[in-house]
Image (tube, rainbow, N blue to C red):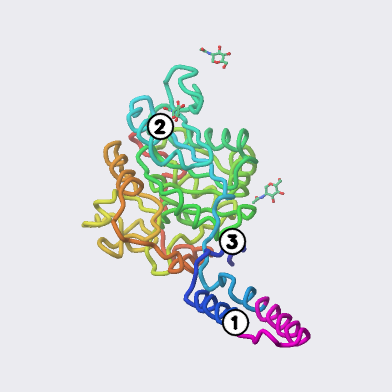
Amino acid sequence: MTYMTSPEIEPLVERTAAASACGQLSGAIMSRKLKIPFRTTVSVLLLLLSLNVVVMMYLLISCRPTKKEEHKINTEKIRVLCWIPSMKERLDRVRAVNETWLARCDGHVFFINNVKPNFSDDVVVSPIMGEGRKMLSRKVKDAMEYVYDYHGSDYDWFLKADDDSYIVMENLKFLLSHYDPSQAVYLGHPLKWLSPGGYMQGGAGYVLSRTALQTFVVNGTKGKACQFELFFDGEDHYVGACLHKLGVPKHNTLDRHGRETFHSLNPVTHISGPIPSTQLVQDHFTMVAGDECCSELTISFHWVDAGLMRTIEHLLYKTSVYGRQVNVEKFKDFIQPGTLAPPYTYIPALEIVVPPKRWK
Ligand SMILES: *[C@@H]1O[C@H](CO)[C@@H](O)[C@H](O)[C@H]1NC(C)=O
Ligand SMILES: *[C@@H]1O[C@H](CO)[C@@H](O)[C@H](O)[C@H]1NC(C)=O
Ligand SMILES: *[C@@H]1O[C@H](CO)[C@@H](O)[C@H](O)[C@H]1NC(C)=O
């Protein structure tokens, strides 16, 4: 089942070779008109003129910049709220995120514990949100409820990213243009363990459509279909397990070449390798290092500290390669929207019902 929406197509205005040939042709007709003998009768002149008008009209119509096959998807109307859980001890990362990719979200909220009230307008400080990693699943539950209550109808898509995730918002919106936010859609870097349906890895960032968020909060957390353990550090598989229980399917984020767009490791590991063997037991798709690691329209990387975050930002947005041009035509049919088949094997984890001993 696919949720294909018709993206808004905007023709690129480009003067083609055909158009310039048309220009020469109409010029030729003009000069032919000038060669008409002076003493030609008025009626013949009128006839030729009207013929000329018809030909000119035809040329005008056929010489407009052709829609050719050049298309660009308009992503301006896709509204994304970004929300980021963090901690007082990691304000350097909060600052780096805020100064780099976050500005390209349509709205954002940080959830930070232990900072003083009124710390910043974009920070929600709540005493009921747990402290530190061991309270992460409870914190994310509370954050999702806050996001739904206060912003649920203002945005189409809701991205959860960490304070060490880097997101390329333009590429995320390009992917989202292939999906319908009024359907239950769940996107990210798919893993195949710990939850029967697998789940999207947290640090790579995951995205819920408006409808998926509503289902998660109204039916899952407030409606109590999903129970969140207080003392467990893995929020992402709780979210995935809850969405699976509610029938919200995972959706495809691979590109046409089978390369991933959401990345759960840091960019150096993805690009230079080696990929840790532990990835094999958890990844839905087999990760490869090197050129095949990452889609040309990559959306995210993880384990990005403040310095690397500013570095990536600079390389992507403040650096040009002289003479290089991107032809958007090559991204036609780049994404094949659809749901992901559930993983054939997953490693069931008792942790979903019994938190690991170390937190007790
Ligand atoms: C925070 O701001 C609100 C209004 O914006 C104000 O009513 C409240 O007293 C402030 N709290 C603190 C602790 O400054
Ligand atoms: C993020 O940046 C904006 C200005 O661009 C600022 O108003 C806001 O306080 C910053 N948020 C944090 C948490 O630093
Ligand atoms: C969510 O709850 C509503 C109201 O109880 C129900 O109609 C709907 O089917 C539920 N959806 C899911 C996915 O469980």
Q: Indicate the quadrant where residue 4 lies.
A: bottom right
Question: Residue 28, position in %: x, y?
Answer: 55, 81
Check disc 1 and give the amino acid type: Ile
Which of discs 3 and 1 lies nearer the camera? The answer is 1
Q: Give the range drawn in magenta.
A: 34-57
Residue 186 vs residue 153, the one in the foreground: 153
The crowding category of the residue bearing disc 2, from other C-alpha atoms within 10 Å (few below 14, some 14 to 19, many at least 20), is many
Residue at image x 63%, y 49%?
211
Which of discs 2 and 1 lies nearer the camera? The answer is 1
Q: Indicate the quadrant where residue 171 lies.
A: bottom left
Assign the C terminus to one quadrant of the image: top left
Check disc 2 and give the amino acid type: Ser
- Residue marked by disc 3: 7
The crowding category of the residue bearing disc 1, from other C-alpha atoms within 10 Å (few below 14, some 14 to 19, many at least 20), is some
Question: Which residue lies most toward the front here?
Answer: 39
Question: Which residue lies most toward the right here?
Answer: 43
Question: Residue 133, position in %: x, y?
Answer: 38, 33
Tag 1 secondary structure: helix
Residue 179 vs residue 245, the one in the foreground: 179
Question: Residue 316, position in %: x, y?
Answer: 34, 49
